[in-house]
Image (cartoon, grey):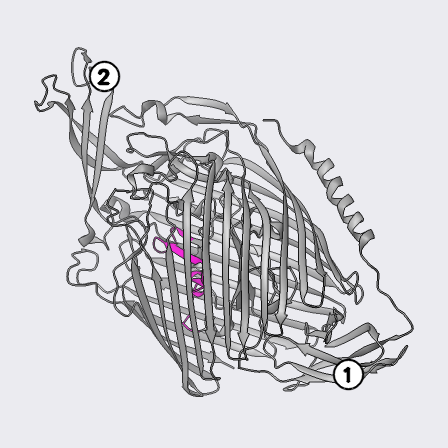
Amino acid sequence: MKTKQAQVIPLVRFVLSAFCLLALLVPTPSFAADTGTVKGKITDKADGEGVYGASVTVAGTTIGTATDMNGNYTLKGVPAKQQKIAVSIVGYASASQVVNVGAGQTAVVNLSLGQTTIMASEVVVGAALYKQDRLEVPVTTNVVSAEKIKEEPSPSLDQVIEDVPGVNINRSAGYSTSTVQIRGSNTFQGGGIGTRVQGLYDGFPINTPESGEIVWTNVNMNAADKVEVMKGAAATLYGSGAMGGVVNVFGHLPDKFEVKAGVSGGFYDAPPSSDKSVYRDGYTPWFWNSYVGIGDKTGKLNYSLMYTHGEDDGHKENTWTQLNDVKLKARYDIDAKQYLQLSAFYNETEGGYASTWPYEAAVDFTFLQPIIMLPDPPGGFIPAGGVDVGVTFNPKTEYAYDAVDSYYADDIIKRKNSLVGLNYVNLLSDKLSLDARVYYTHNETRIDYNPSGLDQSYGFPYLVYMQNPVPGAPNIPLFPAYLEIYNRYAGEFNETKSDRFGAGVKFDWRASDNHRLLFGVDGNIVDVQSTQYVAELPVEGQLGDIQEKNIAFFLQDEWKITDKLTALMSVRYDWSGINADKTTYLDYEEVLSDTDYPDGATAKEATIENPSVDAISPRIALNYKATDDMSFRASWGMSFRSPTLAERFVRDAGLFLGIPNPELDKETMTAYEIGMYKQFSDKVSFDIAAYINDYEDLIESRNLNPNYWPILFQYTNLTKARIWGIETSLNIRPDADWNINLGYAYMNAKNKSADASSLAGNLNPDPEWLAYRPEHTATASVTWKPVSNLALNLSGRYVSEYKAVSSYPNPEGENYPGDFVVFNAGAKFQATDNIGLNFLVRNITNEQYEEAEWFRAPGRSFVLGVDLTY
């Protein structure tokens, strides 16, 4: 297939032409003589300061605007008669005032808003790239509030979103692999390769560009105000990495001077008496975390700076971790219409590279008749009739907290991640605003497989047999052999470094009372140095180079068809390309039957068929606000994902070897969704959604060995897959002292192609089920404030047993992840205005379970913390 770079210009021309045509069709505002103007200022009752971003509307019409940075607003073209001006924003009680609007005159309405602790309609940003009332959002979006984030000491990102319906977390241990699924979008595989969830920090990307990986466990949330989780075909606005959804973390900015500090510590409780792990024999692993921060809002400057340090001995062998994290967010108001905002962080993490629990291997390697015997065995047997290989892995689950073998206990993984992002926002007029941004990200990952000075090898001895020509007679033993599982030379490592330079601009234009247009362009250049994610055959211990470029154009129209019905129509064009047209690799497939696999594989060269890919992603979403407290939504959209450099060229995944796929192409998805959101008074809200996601050319790793072992994988395009499901969430706040959240999600994830869907395929109980996608998940959380300065919380999470896995499948589904219920309990006590105490028990019942295959999750642990605020 030829490169698609030549398609860029005509498609850009198409997008721009479509925008111009749409702009010409947009009705212009009418300023007849029977209209007037309403203006004023919205302030906070507590301090008298202006409230930024409040929604101000003329009740019963589509006329509306948002307050500027000083709380000011202007409504033009208001029909000359008695009108009701309504104001709303999350965190404040709504307010309104009736005013007489005279023709050609200006009426003034100033309102003060009081903050509320009772449920208010949430304001979300992600669905449209600007603020929308929760009742008007056309796609499913969940918000994790600051209150929820602060329920436990120093939480990580995976912990604060694991209760969101439709979100499932797969964690191995420590800072190794962790994957966040949204509606079954991701599988679980080493390094988070090919994630379909876009992670953002203040709107800037945090996925590593070469693999799409986010180690969710090391994204510290001490400096976060809220998290938005958007589901569905999000690629229309966010690009290739967001076809499964978006997780956006909003950094903290204070409203006054503050100094924060805190420390928390705890330990992992002993496992049940049935466990025989050597690591936990008479040993108690401890962990602790501390942070210190300062922030202020004075004059035109608003900033927050925080440093976090954490250490963890690890709940199982070689899962120790260390974290150093610095986050800075600052905003400078140039004047009332424009500002600059900086979002930056840097973190270093280091930890043990986790391995599975111990196991034994039983091997049956039989030469089938006839054979040719050459002189001087055992090297002189050439099978003429084929080879029958059987490998069975028998896990030692009673040693679940130990590493496979001592050789794995010194493996180390190190990461460095940084972001510098700058936004310039200019309210050019009351109808048009500009948001320009530039950003830089740097990511480093290094795995030291063998830091020792000696080569390390681990495996199992076995006998090679010849099939007995006598029917029913036992096979004939020929010679002893050795199944090699792990073989690393002294100092062996894998390392990848990437630098991403990005920029974008978008315009938000309120073209009329009925149309709000958003249009812009995004692009980035990624420079990667890696020991394996490169096109050329890597030189052992050296970093190769490759570059990727991405550019996108998008257009969106929010069309208020009627007072109650709103349509959100958007289209995005993306192009992604790499600077390589050939790849070289070792063809391990040709030596699969050799007893000394993988030695003897020859180097081959192949033409990359799709060095560049592009796609047009449209979306149509409808929101029907049936009443002031109930809305219905429906959406249809198409999205795509380009293959990552890791999927194209990965060659090493710990125990398994990979072969680059020069034929790999983009994958696409068509998404359908219907849903309803209802607020019962101001105390109860209910959300339900049903969805269908149809994947074409789904990119999944496949085992190329028909005999299963040794696993030799390659990323390929499956023909079709369908994931459909239902999600529900119920939030109850009977008063300011109680908060109850219930969630349930059903998911059906099936491969619709002719081939099996996972590495293991037909060895799973349900060969058609997509690997690592649970059918049922449920969450529950209750928070109670018996007195004003004490909050008690109890939460639970259920995940059903997985139906398919990749690495160690069996027809009975034994030792598959899932099938667990985990409860956590916590208490927060505000001792004084400046001192807070918290206590947390994770996994109250000491449930022994796995989220990832053969990786025992943490048992019961206890945490005690102190927070200081001045």
What element does badge 1 sit on? Answer: loop
Instruction: Return the residue nearer the eye: 390 or 256.
Output: 390
What element does badge 2 sit on? Answer: strand
Q: Position of residue 355 (x, y in %)?
A: 30, 48
Q: Earlier in the sequence, mark 2 or mark 1?
A: 1
Task: Indicate the quadrant where residue 669 lies.
Answer: top right
Q: Is residue 97 above or below residue 766?
A: below
* Gap between marks 2 and 1 measured at Cα: 91 Å
**Residue 133 seen in the figure:** no
Instruction: Return the residue nearer the eye: 616 or 227.
Output: 616
Residue 773, disc = none
Q: Is residue 433 above or below residue 257?
A: above
Numbered range of the magenta stretch = 151-179
Q: Position of residue 2 (x, y in %)?
A: 61, 27
Single out the residue that lies furthest toward the front: 626
Q: Along the horizontal axis of the image, is 598 left or right of 790?
A: left
**Residue at position x 43%, y 39% in the image:** 752
The question of residue 155 being in magenta is answered with yes
Q: Position of residue 388 (x, y in %)?
A: 22, 25
Q: Is residue 160 above or below residue 114?
A: above
Q: Which kind of residue does numbered mark 2 sit on? A: Pro
> Badge 2 is on which residue?
383
**Residue at position x 54%, y 38% in the image:** 666
The question of residue 123 being in magenta is answered with no
Q: Along the horizontal axis of the image, is 269 left or right of 276?
A: right
> Closer to the observer: label 2 or label 1?
1
> Badge 1 is on which residue?
109
Q: Which kind of residue does numbered mark 1 sit on? A: Val
Single out the residue that lies furthest toward the left: 473
Tally of marks: 2
Q: Along the horizontal axis of the image, is 201 left or right of 801?
A: right
